[in-house]
Amino acid sequence: MPSSPAHPALHTSTPPRIPPLPPSEWPPALRLLLADSQADGPGRENLFGTLAHHPALAHAWLSLARVLTHEGTLGHRRRELVVLRTAHRLGAAYVYERHRTPAAQAGLTADEIEATATDPHTHPWAPEELVLLQACDLLAANAPVPDGVWDRLARELRPEQLVELLVLAGQTATMCTALNVLRTPSDTTSSDSAARQRRHLTVRLDRERCCSAGQCVGAAPEVFEQSETDGRVTLLVPEPDQRYAADVRLAADLCPSGAITLVDTP
Ligand code: SF4
């Protein structure tokens, strides 16, 4: 299972691999689209400028984005939670920073926006939003969605909303990956995503219960290591940095034998 950085990676000093085209070189339809969608928030010039390298794809991509934004069934608040959490999990500073404004427009408070970039268990999310964030973590890690998580989602969301959730998370992840790999710079300069809630997390591992499935190593390779000798896992960092808290939480959730316990204190 691929691991994911738990904080947005900023590409402020590295030149983009494919520089976004300036608006003067965009197809007219793309310029019109950006002008007509100012209400969707600022900070998309470099995204559009990147897509402008491939006008047909830009049209298809932005059509899907428009449906998800304006004709979606999830609701604005859930949509922005999914986008922010997915962007955070994939280390996509561009997408994360660009969605601060739409998230605020969707009703998320400043504290809630910051909390999307921290361990979800450190914020008093409503249970249905907590499971939504957990689902985003699993999807971003390309991990299986356990029946327990799916059943809780399905109690809250209608079938069309569940389908939309998966498409939205997938579309967001694709954009995050593309912009990360291309090192596309953010249009905004805000870097206050570094402001994090600080909590102290202690990890406990019961090696006797470990059945060597390796889920924890995939979720948090900085914290867990699989022994080449007996296949069981060794704890590398008993008190990991808060940046890895969400990865560790995911590892504990995925562990099939309950070998990992967490002690989370302010
Ligand atoms: S997920 Fe649990 S059982 Fe699997 S290797 Fe890690 S600690 Fe062991």
Image (spheres, grey):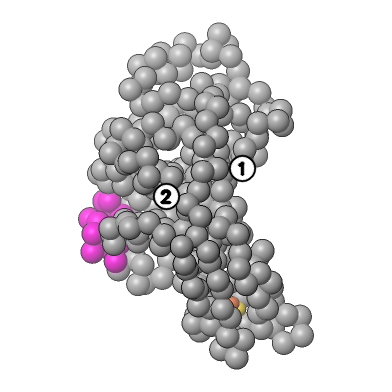
Is the distance from the Cβ of mark 2 to the nearest ligand 1 atom less than 8 Å? no
Q: Which residue is drawn at 23% across and 64% down?
A: 155
Where on the image, by quarter, is ligand 1?
bottom right
Measured as percent of width and height from the top left, residue 131 is found at 35, 61
Q: What residue type is labelled 2?
A: Ala
How packed mark 1 is, by other alpha carbons closer than 10 Å (few <14, some 14-19, many 20 or more), is some
Q: Name the residue under label 2.
A: 115
Q: Give the range drawn in magenta.
A: 152-162
**Taking 69 as reference, is 262 left or right?**
right
Q: Could you tell me what secondary structure mostly forms the magenta stretch?
A: helix
Res 31 → quadrant: top left
Asked whether residue 67 is drawn in magenta, I would say no
Residue 213 seen anywhere in this rendered image of the structure: no
Image position of 265 with respect to 23: above or below: below
- Badge number at residue 9: 1
Cα separation, mark 2 vs mark 1, equals: 17 Å
Is 216 or 177 nearer to us in this picture? 216
Q: In the image as oriented, which residue stretches furthest toward the bottom? A: 208
**Which image quadrant for residue 128?**
bottom left
Residue 253 position in % (x across, y down): 46, 71
Residue 88 shows which numbered tag? none
Query: Is residue 201 among the parts visible in the rendering?
Result: yes
Residue at the limit of the structure toward the top, as seen here: 24
Give the residue drawn at x 48%, y 25%. Answer: 43
Q: Where is residue 235 in the image (x, y as percent from the top left)?
A: 65, 75
Disc 1 on helix, strand or loop?
loop
